Amino acid sequence: MADVSKLETELLSAIGAASDEAALEQVRVAALGKKGSVSELLKTLGGMSPDERKTQGPLINSLRDRVSDALARKKSALGDAALNTRLASERVDVTLPARPEPQGTIHPVSQVLDEITAIFGDLGFAVAEGPDIEFDDNNFTKLNIPPDHPARQMHDTFYMAKQKDGSSHVLRTHTSPVQVRTMLTQKPPIRIISPGRTYRFESDATHAPMFHQYEGLVIDETSSLANLKWVLEEFYKAFFEVDKVELRARPSYFPFTEPSVEWDLRCDRSVPGRIVFGTGNDWLELAGSGMVNPRVLEMCGIDPTKYQGFAFGGGLDRLAMLKYGIPDVRPLFESDVRWLKHYGFSAFDVPTLDGGLSR
Amino acid sequence: MKFTLSWLKAPLDTDASAQQITDKLTSIGLEVESVEDAGTRLKDFTVAYVVSAEKHPNADKLKLCMVDTGAGEPVQVVCGAPNARTGMKAVFAKPGTVIPATGAELKIGTIRGVESRGMLCSIRELLLGDEHDGIIELPADAKVGEPAAKALGLNDPVIDISLTPNRGDAASVYGIARDLAAAGMGRLRDGDLSPVPGKFTSPIHTKLDFPFGAENAAPMFAGRFIRGVKNGPSPKWLQDWLKAVGLRPISALVDVTNFLSLDRGRPLHVFDAAKLKGNLRARFAKDDEHLAALDGKTYTLDSEMVVIADDAGAQSIGGVMGGEHSSCTDTTTDVFIESALFDPVRIARTGRILGIVSDARYRFERGVDPEFVLPGIELATKMILEFCGGEPSEVVVAGATPNWTRNISFTPAAVKKLAGIDVPRDEIVRILGALGFTVEGNDPMTVVPPSWRNDVVGSADLVEEVVRIYGLDKVPSMPMSRPSVIARSTLTPAQRRCRIVKRTLAARGFNETVNFSFIPRGHAKLFGGGDEARQLQNPIAADLDAMRPSVLPSLLAAAQRNAARGFNDVMLFELGAQFESGMPGEQKTVAAGIRSGVGAKSWTKSGHAPDAFDAKADMLAALETAMNGPMTAPIKQGAAAWYHPGRSGTLALGPKTLAYFGELHPKVLTAFDLKGPVSAFEVFMDAIPDSKAKSKARSLFAPSQFQPVERDFAFVVDNTISADAVLKAVKSAERDLIERADVFDVYEGKGVTEGKKSLAVSVRLQPKDKTLTDTEIEAIAGKIVAAVIKATGGTLRA
């Protein structure tokens, strides 16, 4: 029996000494291969007497099991060691920068447009759009601004090349022609906002020759200045994300509304570069508005003895600048990537009323 | 419209403070732009008497003055002004006063060893002008210790209101006073409008000379001759008022007309009668008739403009500006006063075409009071007689006051209905009455606006009058109904597409831009535009003169500007309009984007020069998100002329072009001074069809239970054969089984005949009802090869 235990000692020592998988395989073949030492021993069982086999059988079989186990354990240990060596060699410097990805942004004007449509959408205002190049008739005459009316001087108008008949189309000076187009094609009740590009012949530190306006129009049988005030209050509260606002009304004049009202919002500008709404001692002029002039209703095919309503409007860029602390208007249209990344918004910050308009 | 507080208080009897008045003006719709109140601003500066002015002991150019400030003993002041002298009255600032020019507080100082306890001020130090040659010398009768502003005639606040175009009646101090009186700010004084009896028949007659049908060009023309006047400076009070509102006093005769224009909104003209030949006629100018006007310029008139002419020719541009030839001078002795009515529209047109902005035009184009033609002459007569003496003729009149009365049927309930505010009926009647409206009857009332309110034509106008005087701040806030309890979506499918495309592109790394719709004509021409019809008549700048025919030139110009700042790698997009013509409505909404540069410099070397396939991916991302599904429309080689002809493509759905994509033409890049390449895409948002899906439910997810099989093929085809054609042929071989076919390698070069290319295609077979046997797979492979050979003339690569 000394043979078995001696063989075991030899084999286990050889397994222990195997330094890699190839060496271990040699040991396995030498022990458990067809001609291996353990296999040879197992073969001897066939020639033994039943008694001898009874004692030798378990000894040799358990030798085979123990050698097999030892081989498996050693193989696993060698595998782990090799993996650890590989992993150690695969170390990278994780402080190196990540693979670069471009940082896309949404322009503040688009973002604020989405905010405004979310707010007014909640009150059932659809979004109406119209062309940038307009008929003089839609931009002026149907809005009760006939040719050579002094009010045309308030609109520094861009004119397109002359037509054959000497007349010229204009770049719309406000989005009010969208209201005209809406009234000409829809029956009351009407609730729309009309945001979009507008153009005035002015260019200085606080004006760009192209800018964005939003206007609202409500036509039904009862809506009054009191409803207008409520709409504006609710809008500014929602837009500036404050609990209260205070509006001040001033009589004004727009040919397309009668009575006409301008609205100032109470604010605090005591800290330079910062505006807080709803408190303070300053007033900020934010919107022009009024009850739609019956003449305008009539010219747009709506019966002024039955229907009435209000219109209001203001600067979309200006709202964006006020809310997000953008000091100058002109860079909005200069496409400086540094500015776009600084003031832009993540594509995934879609303004919603439940999730909040902004972060 | 500027006026001073004391001027306003001539027609308005009131105890109200300047602050109360300006607050009220804004609240009734006469918005106060600014109040320049030198009296308040300079309240710390007083009149002082220079008792003595002697040379400073230690400085040649300085003087040592003893100054009597009216408060105690004279104080010692060191002064550097050359005009400082004994016996003068000067403006004194005591220590502690903030000097306007420097914003610094004056301190007791020691100048060259001598103490100075105050300062004598110059015009510039008080920010009253630029003069600083010396200190201000006040009149000898100025009272020591009084506010200097008073002695300077500056204690009268100047109020500037921004007048809306409808309020011609408020283009006068009197009209403003009338509004304030109606709003409870005092009592209106009417002034003496009684006629001055004429002493003789005017040697000059007035005549209206217009063709039939054009009589409203000037419906009334009145005048009066005054002989034996002596022109000279007008009284100080009048000069002070005119100066305060920015007018230069000229002479009594001219100042009177300027005053009445501002005070009563009644423009007048005074001719030097000696320079006129014959009678005066109001008539249309002749085309190309010239007139040298009072502003020193010569204007070329046309036959739609009205002139006042004598036998020699045009002497003034009616209602706009007088002529130089017949203007009054110091030697004028006989004058003729013109007071007329002109058609507001013609005045506006004349002023606009000639580029003349005058006080007369301002008032006539807004509409003057038609009943004030003759009172205007009487007021002018009285002032001229008072200032210049002389003898008036009888008034001559051509034409007559046009009928201006309008009856408006007015229901008091309209105030509540339109403005949402309860105003008692009595208050409505009181307000309208105070503003000069006559009110008769009950409900409806008949309201007649006064002659000076040509802007009030209907019930809504009356509501405005009532509400602005009653107080707009009393309008309550009233909720509106909600159309549905839980808000419904209000955006159209097209609007939603625009929104999601913007956010998709931003998520891909593009920065959204908003650029001007007008671009340089040279840029427009590169993109199929720049034609006459898309030009602006009056561009804001010479290089912003063409409506853009594509969004790309805006983006390329932006890329160039960024490159000039050192940012070569940009990904920019804009969703906006491109203009197909100069006609309203002929514009397209386009989502366009560009990539330039190789991306950020990085150790990962992951950047690459943008190519057609970047643009294709961008374009497809935009389109597929917009259409909410895979884009299957065929892609054609080539795109618009501004793209690289061999590296661009077009995607069309039937006759509608959905998108262009590719690398831009090198010539375009050169024109924008960009070092290429630049990839670009244009997605035409209006061409995207609305979804036809009738249900929100998705199609059923039913994956096959059977093992898919992948087989790779390599085909050799002419290199003019498109990958798309090969893939199409592959798919046509067994439509039900071939789930997808992808090109995974394209090779030209060694081993492939010149003019040919090798395309490696991976095909995935997905059986639906049983597992494919080897024989079946081989049969399908054979069909695929046969289909490709048949369709493309290619061969299976050996």
Image (cartoon, coloured by chain):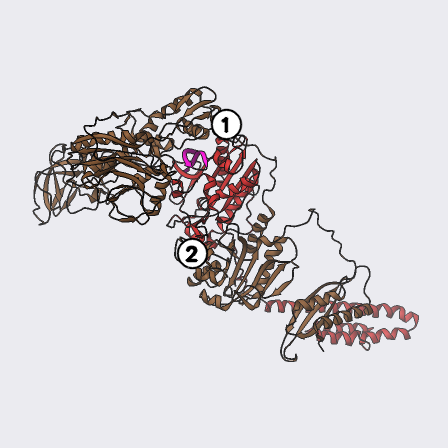
Chain colours: A red, B brown
In the picture, the disc for residue B773 is none
Image quadrant where residue A14 sits: bottom right
The range drawn in magenta is A242-271
Three-letter residue code for mark 2? Asp
Q: Do we see residue A175 in this rendering?
A: no
Residue that numbered label 1 is attached to: B417
**Mostly what secondary structure, the magenta segment?**
strand
Q: Which residue in the rendered view is the most extreme toward the right?
A: A50
Q: Are marks 2 and 1 on the same chain?
A: yes
Give the x, y percent position of residue B285: 31, 44
Does the magenta segment cover residue B168? no
Please tell me which residue is depicted at 65% across the width and 62% down the height of the picture.
B634
Label 1 neighbourhood size at 10 Å, few (<14), some (14-19), many (20+)?
some
* Residue A191 in the image: above or below residue B553: above
Residue that numbered label 2 is attached to: B545
Give the x, y percent position of residue A86: 62, 69
* Residue A182 in the image: above or below residue A341: above
Which sits in the foreground, B25 or B68?
B25
SS at circle 1: helix
Give the x, y percent position of residue B201: 21, 30
